[in-house]
Image (cartoon, rainbow, N blue to C red):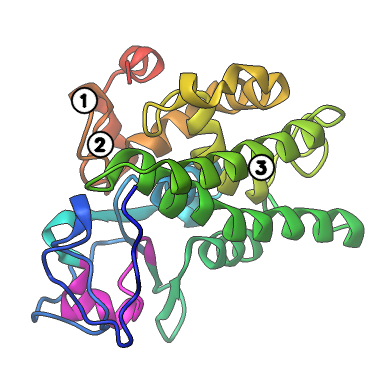
């Protein structure tokens, strides 16, 4: 490994950045004018089915499955590799230019919500669902929700980047982030040893936030790293991941705004429950990853 000596002043090299070099930049703001489409429902979601995006579509599908008709939504595809997140309309909803972003138009004045944890909390409070009302249980749920917000960058931007996406692989960063990801899996495994779900016996937004990342990891969907990290050793996490994946709303949520993988798993846009009719329930249940 060639030792790197940082320069006195860092400068932006547009050719660096590996797989995502074309969309990485050290400045914020819009790069082009483009308004966002608006559908017929009060909730307008602009997203892509990455783990962060999947959190919200799972939540919306779970709300609908629980009978909350006001959770009907339009989901519009944001192709981040094409730079859609830098359009003026998207930046107006999320100045951080990251998916997912939600506009809630159910009231007199539209409300913008960005950051997946904020969206999950907004929806849980709006519909009174998947968030405990008991103060202690509510605190536990929020603690794990925020745990995910702080932990996932080590899995995605840390381990995932250096193991799967960096233009060159080096031992130090891969070892550093592999150690941290395995520590996080151990944290979850110990938590789930005596609890059905992350925050207790109740399925909550904490599960919806953590599952797309760490459930996806032990299911073999992230970075093809299951064998490398020996994810099968975390038996409680595997049990929990399998139970959540068995939920029909989770299967539907994973399909929305998905534009990669098996075509049977993709639903680029979602504007009505009938949009799933072209994807039979048998396909949803057996779709290969």
Between circles 1 and 3, the one closer to the viewer is 3
- Residue shown at the point (16%, 65%) measured from the top left: 84
SS under mark 3:
helix
- State whether residue 139 is above or below residue 243: below
Q: Are marks 1 and 2 in contact (CB under 8 Å)?
A: yes
Residue 63 visible? The answer is no
Residue 241 placement (x, y as % from top left):
59, 26
Alpha carbon separation for disc pair 2 and 3: 37 Å
Alpha carbon separation for disc pair 1 and 3: 38 Å
SS under mark 2:
helix
Residue 207 visible? The answer is yes
Between circles 2 and 3, the one closer to the viewer is 3
> Which residue bears the numbered disc 2?
275
Magenta stretch bounds: 85-101
> Which residue bears the numbered disc 3?
184
- State whether residue 253 is above or below residue 136: above
Please tell me how crowded label 2 is: few (under 14), some (14-19), or many (20+) other residues with Cα within 10 Å: few
Residue 192 placement (x, y as % from top left):
78, 31
**Badge number at residue 278:** 1
Q: In this view, does 191 lie to the left or right of 229?
A: right
- State whether residue 49 is above or below residue 74: above
SS under mark 1:
helix
- Residue shown at the point (56%, 37%) measured from the top left: 214
């Amino acid at each position: 490994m060639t030792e790197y000596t940082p320069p006195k002043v860092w400068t932006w090299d547009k050719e660096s950045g590996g797989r995502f070099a074309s969309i990485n930049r050290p400045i914020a703001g819009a790069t082009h004018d483009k308004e966002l489409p608006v559908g017929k429902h009060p909730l307008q979601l602009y997203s892509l089915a990455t783990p962060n995006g999947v959190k919200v579509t799972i939540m919306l599908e779970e709300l609908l499955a629980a009978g909350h008709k006001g959770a009907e939504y339009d989901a519009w595809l944001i192709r981040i590799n094409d730079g859609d997140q830098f359009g003026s309309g998207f930046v107006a909803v999320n100045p951080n230019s990251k998916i997912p972003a939600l506009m809630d138009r159910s009231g007199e004045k539209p409300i913008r919500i960005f950051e997946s944890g904020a969206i999950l909390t907004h929806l849980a409070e709006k519909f009174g669902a998947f968030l405990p009302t008991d103060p202690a249980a509510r605190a536990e749920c929020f603690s794990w929700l925020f745990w995910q917000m702080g932990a996932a960058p080590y899995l995605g931007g840390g381990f995932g980047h250096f193991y799967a996406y960096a233009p060159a692989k080096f031992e130090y960063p891969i070892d550093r982030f592999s150690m941290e990801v395995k520590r996080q899996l151990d944290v979850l495994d110990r938590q789930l040893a005596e609890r059905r779900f992350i925050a207790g016996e109740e399925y909550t937004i904490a599960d919806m936030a953590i599952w797309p990342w760490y459930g996806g990891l032990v299911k073999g969907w992230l970075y093809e790293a299951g064998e490398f990290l020996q994810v099968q050793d975390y038996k409680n996490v595997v049990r929990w991941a399998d139970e959540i994946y068995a939920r029909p709303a989770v299967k539907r949520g994973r399909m929305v705004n998905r534009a990669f993988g098996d075509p049977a798993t993709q639903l680029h846009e979602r504007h009505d429950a009938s949009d799933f009719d072209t994807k039979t329930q048998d396909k949803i249940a057996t779709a290969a990853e």
